[in-house]
Image (spheres, helix red, strand yellow):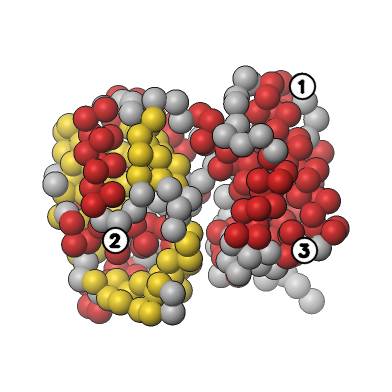
């Protein structure tokens, strides 16, 4: 079965490294230098201080991935429209795209291009860091969960393949709880670490950062509750702090974006809380402040004294 990885950044690269020996894998990525390094030297993945390379095939033109049976979309939110067009070209007529991206709204962008019956969604707790062209670090193992819709047979086939590759994966008929569970973790960690330029563990250690995290998470929880979302944990603030401690040495994906001067996913994470809160008549001042600060930081890059 041919699988296309659309976007081989941190998590996309980790998934590609694990899947490479188990299927006909094609990486589709717009970064020419990354594609060249992957084809020339292989995909290097660092795990527990040990680096191993695996041969992969990488392309910039999604037509060269046709006919993929499945496409795993792992680009940043600002690249989702490009990914949707890439999937339309790379997928076989009966092929299915699965988004494993952070935040809200990516599924809708893919569905607008491909049709809702050709787009599935998943949540992954894998940790990864893009080290450079052709190089990633697997920063932590975590479970992946896939929606049974729109095609249970393909969802189960993908789950079986990921499990075979060594990545714990399950399927569910109700993904909303897990989507919001992960969203609230990202809401509490990503923007704050990116603005402070600190690793995740600092948020649990520093009282001021911990207080800000608690306020941001509390707003997101109220927005979730107003929509009838049941979270997969009983104490959201305690859970987010536990994640920060468990990933203490990690740089959040948003901090990684800021350090390399790339656009962040602030609009689909904290920005999603602000937008939904506004529709529901719920104030979200802490999340709104983080969105404003991050947007200002991005748009003034390179204009320092």
Camera-side residue: 188 or 78?
Answer: 188
Q: In the rendering, at what x and y percent does residue 121 appear?
A: 39, 36
Residue assigned mark 2: 18
Label whose residue precedes the other's in the sequence (1 or 2): 2
Quadrant of the rendering where the C terminus is positioned? bottom right
Inter-mark Cα distance, 1 to 3: 33 Å
- Residue at figure coordinates x 85%, y 59% from the top left: 207
Residue assigned mark 3: 205
Nearer the observer, disc 1 or disc 3? 3
Q: In the rendering, at what x and y percent does residue 151 appear?
A: 26, 27
Residue 29's quadrant in the figure?
bottom left
Residue assigned mark 1: 281
Q: In the rendering, at what x and y percent does residue 139 appear?
A: 48, 66
Camera-side residue: 108 or 53?
Answer: 53
Label whose residue precedes the other's in the sequence (2 or 3): 2
- Residue at figure coordinates x 69%, y 52% from the top left: 241
């Amino acid at each position: 079965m041919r699988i296309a990885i659309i976007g081989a950044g941190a998590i996309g690269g980790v998934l590609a490294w694990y899947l490479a020996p188990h299927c006909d894998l094609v990486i589709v990525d717009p970064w020419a230098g990354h594609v060249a390094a992957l084809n020339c030297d292989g995909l290097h993945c660092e795990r527990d201080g040990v680096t191993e390379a695996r041969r992969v095939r990488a392309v910039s033109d999604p037509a060269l991935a046709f006919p993929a049976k499945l496409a795993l979309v792992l680009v940043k939110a600002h690249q989702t429209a490009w990914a949707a067009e890439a999937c339309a070209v790379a997928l076989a007529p009966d092929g299915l795209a699965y988004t494993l991206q952070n935040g809200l709204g990516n599924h809708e962008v893919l569905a607008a291009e491909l049709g809702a019956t050709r787009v599935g969604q998943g949540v992954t707790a894998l940790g990864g860091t893009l080290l450079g062209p052709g190089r990633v670090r697997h920063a932590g193992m975590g479970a992946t969960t896939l929606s049974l819709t729109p095609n249970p047979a393909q969802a189960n086939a993908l789950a079986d393949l990921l499990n075979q590759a060594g990545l714990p994966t399950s399927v569910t008929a109700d993904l909303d709880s897990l989507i919001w569970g992960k969203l609230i973790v990202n809401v509490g960690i990503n923007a704050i670490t990116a603005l402070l330029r600190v690793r995740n563990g600092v948020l649990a250690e520093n009282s001021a950062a911990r207080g800000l995290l608690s306020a941001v998470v509390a707003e997101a929880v109220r927005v979730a509750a107003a929509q009838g979302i049941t979270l997969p944990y009983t104490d959201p603030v305690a859970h987010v702090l536990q994640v920060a401690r468990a990933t203490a040495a990690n740089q959040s994906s948003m901090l990684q974006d800021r350090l390399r001067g790339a656009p962040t996913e602030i609009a689909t994470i904290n920005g999603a809380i602000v937008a939904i809160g506004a529709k529901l008549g719920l104030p979200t001042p802490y999340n709104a402040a983080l969105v404003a600060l991050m947007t200002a930081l991005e748009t003034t890059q390179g204009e320092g004294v």
